[in-house]
Image: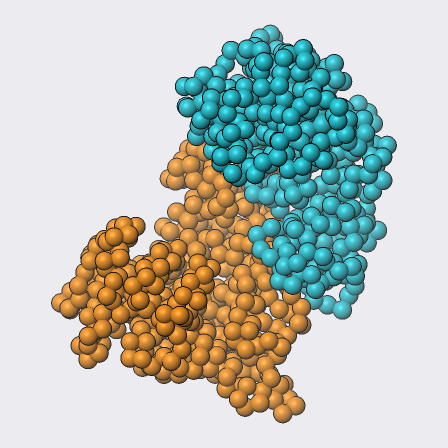
Chain colours: A cyan, B orange
Amino acid sequence: MRAILLFGAGKSSYFLIDYLIKNATIQNWQLTICDISQNLISKDFENNSYEFVSIDINNDEERSRLIKGKSIVISMLPAFMHPIIAKDCLKYNVNFASASYQSDEMIAMKDEIESKGLIFLNECGLDPGIDHMSAMEEIDKIQVNGGKIISFRSYCGGLIAPDCIDNPWAYKFTWNPRNVVLAGQGTAKYLENSKLKLLPYQRLFQKTERIEFGNNLIFEGYPNRDSISYKSTYKLDGIKNMIRGTLRMPDFCSAWNLLVNLGITDDSYKIQDSQKMTLKQFTESYLDDSEKQVKEKFCDFFQLNPNDKIVEMIEWLGLFNDEKITDINASPAGILQTILESKWKLNPSDRDLVVMQHIFEFEQEGTLKTKKSNLYLEGETSTKTAMAKTVGLPLAIAVKLILNNKISAKGLLIPVSEEFYNPILSELTKYGIKFRN
Amino acid sequence: MRAILLFGAGKSSYFLIDYLIKNATIQNWQLTICDISQNLISKDFENNSYEFVSIDINNDEERSRLIKGKSIVISMLPAFMHPIIAKDCLKYNVNFASASYQSDEMIAMKDEIESKGLIFLNECGLDPGIDHMSAMEEIDKIQVNGGKIISFRSYCGGLIAPDCIDNPWAYKFTWNPRNVVLAGQGTAKYLENSKLKLLPYQRLFQKTERIEFGNNLIFEGYPNRDSISYKSTYKLDGIKNMIRGTLRMPDFCSAWNLLVNLGITDDSYKIQDSQKMTLKQFTESYLDDSEKQVKEKFCDFFQLNPNDKIVEMIEWLGLFNDEKITDINASPAGILQTILESKWKLNPSDRDLVVMQHIFEFEQEGTLKTKKSNLYLEGETSTKTAMAKTVGLPLAIAVKLILNNKISAKGLLIPVSEEFYNPILSELTKYGIKFRN
């Protein structure tokens, strides 16, 4: 009997819980799920056997008691909570798994994890996760066949199924809204012609690449904050071009660029008495003072035609109207997030979309070749989302591999080796998560 | 006998130490100066009586022993160290004085300072300091005479005496270089026509106001990060326009704006192996990849003529040449700071300049009136700077007032009341620090 403890039972955990429950009997697993309230767990799992626990996660004693004696702990909590849990795992010799980026705090535990022979697996969801595995499968294949990779571009997006698009942004939230509002702040780093390229936030959404899925589906990709950090992990040390980025529907980036350059994605200061302002006044505070209407001032400022699609997108958000701001003494980004959470809400009839594309350029036998690898997956319903599926299933399968001693490596890991990507990508195809060239 | 302890004996403390030493006998003061090395103290004070102490400022015991029993502690250390010292002062019932902005940590001690009947005076240097006092003197005068202030604009700059200008930026460092490089990051807030105006960093140096001193001296002012925070402190609650800002010589802001918008004032990330790059490569990392020369690419990017004065200013910094970067794995802002520290170094023959201007608009007896108040002060030598004089003397005089029980207010204070500004501004005129209309 192996004991699995899952922290976090919210929307993104649907398929993770589904997989763990369905495999529990045959794998001889005992499952414990911990969250604030059992109501967070889908009613679909009502009659299944798992133990539900609610604890104060910041209470060291309660948390330790829960973790002690488990075989593995999975954390789907916000990333900043992982180190607290991981430290307990280290103390009580329990394996750990998450779909989040490896944090510096996690890296600080590296030696101790290794010396105890434990596995702490991070970055095993969608992005990061499936991106690592699907890229490494191709990279290894190309290199084994004598190819020399000179360019790697990789984009991923969590979007809305084309037939569910009913707003001019062609976007709704299927992931953490705050992360979407603050995305890209800082400076993006990528590699072009063997040179480091730095792209500050105010130009990030202007520098997009057109990404096509077949003939009909067109997306735009903007660079992630750091595209280069995986260069050696991916065994691409001599590479000339390397960019990793995020996909949005066309026009999204151009319109978002207006919000960035207006200044309203800033989270570094509060506007006193923001609740006394209208949305129009909020927008006007960034524009010159004049007798003109706000929309005209906005168009003048950006030298845009009032009939331009991207102006319409800003107007649709309500930023030119007299509605009152509800957030009290809030940051601009906080105000914007509240607006977007109501405008970009996923309806019960909506289905989401996950898209990923890798583009490899490599030299083989003296010729330059290009290879594309595409993932296109629509959600089943507004709860059975493609996002929950692609985040939860790789993690669930990885947990199975770890518990069945199929992973020979020990220590602090991310899923970039064959022993992860072969079985995981293979099993994912059964769930429709399949890359095509 | 009153015991004064001064932390920080560097360049900015010259006139502060001078004043304390010269007044020590008549005032019956015992002076202790604490810093890393006695060599930091000017040789001019060699034969004077003060005690020099060097301690590990982070050693609680050594620091406490030094502070205990003193009448007042003056801190000229970097601002982040004030709270550590202030906490000891609170513990041992010692008054405290600094020329830095009141921090949140200082404000958290407010009630305790008051209940102990101590004085913790901050913001009593130049800016903040002389700006508060000179503005309040005029504001009180206008309001006592029945004037209603509708507009307050106030600018201050630490610059170079016109006859010492020998570089195209007309600027050298007379204050903390890091603060100059990072100045204005975030979003500036000011008041225009009774409306909140927000100006993000990337537009800050484009939004300058022309400020004249007589007919010949022209400066440009850009808004401070928060111009509104002193609205009620200055008793200007019904005011329509309020802006506080920083003065630079003409063209400085336009050229600095290029650096900001290129992206190289960012301190939020490191460039790996920056020491392997040349300055040209550093600049090029922010520009499109092409066969063109870096200067041409730079001009294309900003749509500037290569003969433009501001392009020449960038070129003068060396950003287009093949010199190697010396900073190892540094942030862009760190690399830029190193460049500027060598380019904008104050030579032994240089004298600095402090300028301040307040512009008040007010209604009196039905008519709209304007009043200007100007401070123009050149330094005597490269050590006897106008900066050290205008930062150190107000603080020194305030300390004298506090020790002589001339300040009736107790608690956490800034010098905005008559009992501060009358005696301090009056005594400052003896040192040539005098406002003119």
Which of the pair B99/B102 is nearer the observer?
Answer: B102
On screen, residue A247 above or below B117 = above
Residue at 52% across, 34% down: A62
Considering every residue shown, the one lying at the far bottom of the view is B365
Percent of width and height locating residue A5: 59, 25
Considering every residue shown, the one lying at the far left of the view is B47
Percent of width and height locating residue B436: 44, 82
Percent of width and height locating residue B279: 45, 40
Q: In this view, does B312 lie to the left or right of A166?
A: left
Regarding residue B9, the answer to whether it shows in the image is: no
Residue at 78% across, 54% down: A318
Q: In which quarter of the image is residue B360?
A: bottom right
Which of the pair B431/B227 is nearer the observer?
Answer: B227
On screen, residue B393 above or below B224 = below
Q: In this view, does A122 lie to the left or right of B345?
A: right
Regarding residue B108, the answer to whether it shows in the image is: yes
Q: In which quarter of the image is residue A123?
A: top right
Position of the C terminus of chain A by quadrant: top right
Percent of width and height locating residue B355: 43, 71
Residue at 62% across, 19% down: A30
Position of the N terminus of chain A by quadrant: top right
Which of the pair B284/A43 is nearer the observer?
Answer: A43
